[in-house]
Amino acid sequence: MRIATVERKTNETYVKAAVNLDGTGVYEVDTGIAFLDHMMEQLSRHSLMDITLKAKGDLHIDFHHTTEDVGIVLGQAIAKALGDMKGITRYGNAIIPMDETCSRCSLDISGRPFIVWKVDFRRDKIGDMDTELFLEWFRAFAHGVGMTLHVENMYGENNHHIIESCFKALARAMRSALEIDLRKADALPSTKGVIGDQSDKLD
């Protein structure tokens, strides 16, 4: 079973995340930020990862530290559950429509964290959450997993639809990338025989 738990405590937050990469999309989430909970639930359901996530942070200041640290710890739990990464499909991409909105996500679980973010919002907040924090979560998550992540909202009007379609696209892309390729279940998906070698950016 590809399962893992990661716990992180700082002066700003306490976050604990447990994942089962071969789950059925069961979740139990409580970050103290209602809209972030909603997005983590979407990530679990549409990736089929089981996610248990608990966070307590300095929300009396703002939501920044909690949002960022949730991304870090959840990403680290996935990286830990991946283990030696043998057999994974590695790449994933998805295009997700949601009413008038359409967003796409492409990713490479490469061991080389990088993010390209092409998502704009017309409002400063969705619910109580600052829209600028979504980039912070996606960046932290990409670094936690150790992956290259491209997210783009191609078009849309409703800000809730825009970010939800981005999370759902991430979920479906993750589902593809995390799957075991039965034709190469015992091998790393790299010609180098190693994933994440910073000395050589090409494979």
Image (spheres, rainbow, N blue to C red):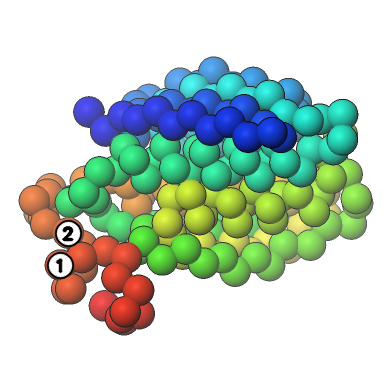
Is disc 2 in contact with disc 1, using a CB cutoff of under 8 Å? yes
User: Residue 190 is drawn in which quadrant?
Assistant: bottom left
- Disc 2 packing (10 Å; few <14; some 14–19; many ≥20): some
Residue 50 in sight here: yes
Which residue: 87% across, 35% down? 61
Viewer-side residue, 101 vs 187: 187
* Residue at the disc numbered 2: 188
- 78 relative position to 55: left or right: left
- Disc 1 packing (10 Å; few <14; some 14–19; many ≥20): few
User: Residue 9 is drawn in which quadrant?
Assistant: top right
* Mark 1: secondary structure: loop
Kind of residue at disc 1: Gly
The spot of residue 118 in percent (x, y) is 68, 67
- Quadrant containing the C terminus is bottom left
Viewer-side residue, 156 vs 52: 52
As drawn, 203 above or below 27? below
- Quadrant containing the N terminus is top left
Kind of residue at disc 2: Leu
- 136 relative position to 61: left or right: left
**Labelled disc at residue 193:** 1
The spot of residue 94 in percent (x, y) is 48, 56
Viewer-side residue, 10 vs 88: 10
